[in-house]
Image (cartoon, rainbow, N blue to C red):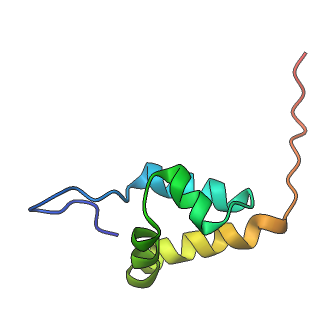
Amino acid sequence: MLFNNPVGRPTKMNIRTMVKLADALKNNYSVTDACKWAKISRVTYYRHMNNDPAFAAKMTYAMECRNKVSFNFVTTY
């Protein structure tokens, strides 16, 4: 995944945006709502899904994890 463009406007897709998208998709957000929350367009999301295999793999994994239940057994006193 290339984050630095030598010329022009910086890309909206960075690590923070990817984490926001993955968290939203894991929490049963739709793609539209996840993109709104991460402040990117759906066009940007689908462009990266089609052109970047690493991004596509991470987002696919996040969507697969929707139905898994996670428990936190850490207790604080």
User: Who is closer to the viewer here, 40 or 51?
Assistant: 40
Question: In the rendered view, would you say 53 is above or below 26?
Answer: below
Residue nearest the viewer, comparing 37 with 26: 37
Residue at point 39%, 69% (across, down): 44
Expressed as whole percent of the image width and height from the top left, the position of residue 28 reads 74, 61
State the image coordinates of residue 34 (x, y, percent, origin top left).
59, 58
Image height of 8 relative to 52, above or below: above
Residue at x 58% of width, y 70% of height: 59
- Name which residue lies at 28% across and 59% down: 11
Q: Farthest residue in the top direction?
A: 77
Q: Residue at x 28, y 61 (%)?
A: 3
* 16 to the left or right of 32: left
Quadrant occupied by the N terminus: bottom left
Q: Is residue 57 left or right of residue 74?
A: left
- Quadrant assignment for the C terminus: top right
The location of residue 6, given as percent across then percent down, is: 11, 62
User: x, y percentage for residue 70?
Assistant: 85, 53
Residue 68 in which image quadrant = bottom right
